[in-house]
Amino acid sequence: MGVTGAASAQDVEAVIAEFTAAGYSMSSPHVPALGFSVSSQDDNRGGRKYIPSLETLIPLVRQAAGRVLPVIHFRTDNKNTLCGQVKKVFNSAYEEGKRGLYEEGLCRTLQLNWTSDPQLVSQLRTIKKDPELCEMQIILRLGRGDMRVRTNGEIAKEILKYGKTINYVIIAAEMTTGKFDLERVVSLYLELRKIRHLTVGFTGRFTGDNVEERVGALNDGIKTNSKPSETATMCINAKDGLMTDNVLDPQKFRAYLQALARVQP
C-alpha cells in the first residue's frame, strides 16, 4: 500500500506514523511503501516541491528504510542511457564513508513510466544483468494515454516483451476519460494477471473520500471474474490526490490511509 511524494524528513515521519496508525507495517499482510519522486532533470525541478534533490534523497531513504518499503519513482526523457542514470541515483553516496542506496540495501525498488520504446526493454535487460543493480525490483506504470490507443491484449503483448525484467505493473485507475473506469481497469488487471510472475496493482487520484469505494469495487470486480483458486493480490498507490500546492498534505494522506485500511487491511 503506497503513498508517493515525500520530500522532507517531516514528510517521512508523518507518513510512517499514519501507516502505523492504520495498521500497516513491514510484517503486515500489505506492506507500506513510501515513494520518492526523482527526475533526471535534477537541477530544474520546475516548482515540483515533491521532487527532492539527489543529495536530499539519500538521507530521506535512509530514514525510511526498514520501517516502510522505499520506492524510487524515476522520470527521464532519455531512455537510451537509463541504466547509467539509475546507477547515479542508486549508487551515489553523497556522504563520506557511506555507500549508495542499492549497495547498502536501503532501496532496491524502482518505478518507471511505461513506454513501448524498444530502448526501455533493452535498458531494463541491461539493469538486470548489471552486478551493481541486478536485484532491482522494477515497477512499470501504465498511464491513461496507454489505454486510449491500445486494447488490453495489445498492452499485454507489449508487457510480455519485458519478460522477467519487470516485477510489477501499476495501472492508472483514472484511464480513458479521467474518471474511474472500473470495467476497463478490472479487465486489464485480469489480462495482465495471466503473466504469472507479475504483481498487478492500481494508482490514480485515490483520496480519503473515494479509495474505500473504489478499492472495494476493484476487489469485487476481480473476485467476480476469478476462479475460487485465484487470489486477488494487488497493490495500491496514491500521490496526486494527496497533495496541496505540490506538497503532501497530512490531513489528506491520513484520511486516505484510514479509509484504505478499512477495505485493504
Image: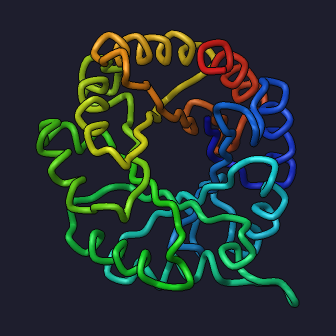
Q: Residue furthest front?
A: 229
Left or right? Give the position of 177 relative to 48. left
The residue under the point 75% across, 42% down is 26
Quarter of the N terminus within the rendering: top right
Q: Position of residue 215 (x, y in %)?
A: 49, 18
Classify 117 as above or below 9. Answer: below
Could you say which is closer to the camera, residue 172 or residue 109? Answer: 109
Q: Position of residue 257 (x, y in %)?
A: 69, 25
Quarter of the C terminus within the rendering: top right
The residue under the point 27% across, 29% down is 190
Task: Name the colouring of the figure.
Answer: rainbow
The residue under the point 73% across, 33% down is 28
Could you say which is closer to the camera, residue 41 or residue 35? Answer: 35
| Residue 96: quarter of image | bottom right
The residue under the point 15% across, 50% down is 157
Q: Position of residue 183 (x, y in %)?
A: 26, 17
Left or right? Give the position of 24 relative to 158. right
Could you say which is closer to the camera, residue 126 or residue 42? Answer: 126
| Residue 232: quarter of image | top left
Q: Position of residue 110 (x, y in %)?
A: 52, 61
Could you say which is closer to the camera, residue 173 or residue 153? Answer: 153
Left or right? Give the position of 158 relative to 171. left
How many numbered marks, from 0 up?
A: 0
